[in-house]
Image (cartoon, rainbow, N blue to C red):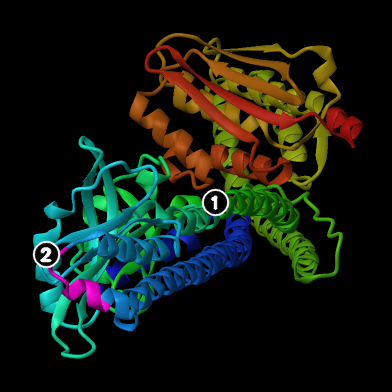
Amino acid sequence: MVSYIRRILRNIWLFLANLPMERKLIVVFVFLVSIPITYVSYLTSRSMVNSVLVNATEGASQMTSNASDTIDRYVADLKRYTALPLYNMDVQFYLEQKITDWDKNTKLNMFLSYLHHTKEEILAVYLVDRYGTVFHNRDPSINQLFPEEQQTEWKSLTEAAGVAPVIQGRHTIRVNSGEQRDVFSILRTVNSVNTLKKIGIIAFDVDINLFKGIIDPVNAVTQGNTLIVDNKGDLIYDGAVHGEQADKKLSLNTQQLLKKATQPEGHFQMDLEGQSFLVVYTISKQTGWTTLVAIPQDRILSPVQKNRNTLLFTTLIIVAFALFVATVISHALTKPLKSMVRLMKQVQHGNLDVWLHPKYNDEIGMLGSHFNRMIIRVKDLLQEVSVTEKRKQKADMRALQNQINPHFIYNTLESIRMLAESNDDPRVAKLTYLLGLQMRYSITRSDETVTVKHELEHVKNYFHLLQIRFPDKFKLEIEVPEVFLSLPIIKLVFQPIVENAVFHGLDQKEGPGTLMISAKFEGSHAVFCVEDNGVGMDENTLISLNNSLMDGATGEKFGIGLRNVNERIRLHYGSAFGLRVESELGIGTRVILRIEDPSTKASEE
């Protein structure tokens, strides 16, 4: 597991490390801004929720405690009223009297009327004498009571309670024949103050709507639903039902609510049917009843949710602004680096005419300055290499001339000897004259620049020598426009190419052959073509020849002349210039020579 997590973290790090610098800065900026803001927003939202819940809990606790105290005081008053028969000697006397006469009815009714009017919520007050006769005083809205239906329950409760008052929870009594009322009752056994024997029972039936005036303010303030539940889990009063609120899920789960109410007072959170409630409760020491208020959390947190949405929207705006600022700053910081990378790519492709213009004196500016110094140094080094190469090429040329000139002189003299042996001919004088011109042109310094016209005249002289040696074997055609004749060109360029074409192409051809020199412009380049209709060469030989010319390392099998010309052209004009050969076996060969037009270069500069 640990290795898996490490692998994931490593992959994430590699992904971030491989991002462009601009994106890295954006990620860092957004991370540094969004994480703290998001965390602070979360803490603020959480603090607001907790604060609202705490305030709601404290308010509801105070309200339930006050409601429970009010109920306790009311019940305590009723319990004290149940003790009044002990202090009334007339009541004591008549409860033990078996016969019910007018005096007994009058005295007991007067006493019950007094008790009934002590609390306006009391629906009825009952006195049961020693012989089971029930006397009562009822609310004016009630025409008829049926106390005999309750006597059994009264007897059972009072006997279990002894001499202490007892509370009978919510129950229904029948009044006016078909009408029913919900009440709770306070009962006590009435004992004789003389004999301490049981002589009767006193009972109060209290309208359950008593709790409405106590509970409604609690519901109005807390926006919840208040329940009063006895210690058995039976519902005494449901504020939702009496308040005409359609939320009965709480009254159906009183046992579940009581299980969580383990302390004399407190609060807890509970989910019922997919809805969350904050429940605050108080258990009465007087009655044992639990007064609890259940508040839906969405009502409590509704203002908080609005504030949270506003906070979330503000956070998103801040993060978006941070992203925008991060993008702008990252672009500004990485723009010089991008420019430097772009210039480095140009340098990589051989363009050293680049220059970086740093705007600031920071590390990137210092890097740009060092980059410029490096380019200057590279140019100096290349210049030194070029000078060294030129010196080396000159040395090679001198050695080559030492190889070519003796060989050429030897061949020419051999031709003169053969003609002299055959007959005395005036052509010998011409041959000797042409030979002198060739030697004079060749012996001069090879690095001098001449015109194309001079080069072509040297080729013509060379070709005249060939025609004397090989009569009617070769034909030379020069189709070079006048505009090319004045162009400067290095010496001994065309003659080695013509010589190579004669001895490798035309000499091996049966019958006469033709050699043509032409010229044309291609943009800023002057292109010369030396073409023969000799034997040509196969494709593999042609490919090998062009590759060796491109690499600057032509082998001996292709002749010293082509190698020398190609290397001198590339050295003088640059690596983009030189020779290229086109050929077809049995058809002929074309050597294309490309040089730079000096007039075009001067106009560009």
Res. 567 in view: yes
**Most common SS among magenta residues:** helix
Give the label, 2 or 1, closer to the camera: 2
Q: Nearer the viewer, residue 476 or 386?
A: 386
Magenta stretch encompasses residue 317: no
Q: Nearer the viewer, residue 268 or 439?
A: 268
Range covered by the magenta-colored residues: 92-99
Q: Is 605 positioned to the left or the right of 236 in the image?
A: right
Q: Is 16 positioned to the left or the right of 561 in the image?
A: left
* Residue shown at the point (59%, 36%) measured from the top left: 413
* Residue shown at the point (87%, 29%) measured from the top left: 599
Residue carrying label 1: 305
The amino acid type, in three-letter code, at marker 2 is Gly
Q: Secondary structure at mark 1?
A: helix
Q: Specify few, some or many for label 1: CA neighbours under 10 Å numbering under 14, 14-19, or 20 or more.
A: some
Q: Secondary structure at mark 2?
A: loop
Q: x%, y% of residue 82?
A: 31, 74
Screen quadrant of the N terminus = bottom left
Q: Is 113 positioned to the left or the right of 98 in the image?
A: right
Q: x%, y% of residue 558?
A: 45, 37
Q: x%, y% of residue 214?
A: 47, 59
Screen quadrant of the C terminus = top right
Q: Which mark is residue 313?
A: none
Q: Which mark is residue 132?
A: 2
* Residue shown at the point (56%, 22%) measured from the top left: 469
**Gap in Å between the C-alphas at discs 2 and 1?**
64 Å
Q: x%, y% of residue 519?
A: 70, 17
**Outermost residue to the front:** 102
Judge whether 121 appears above or below 96 on screen.
Answer: above
The amino acid type, in three-letter code, at marker 1 is Gln
Res. 188 in view: no
Corner quadrant of residue 555: top left
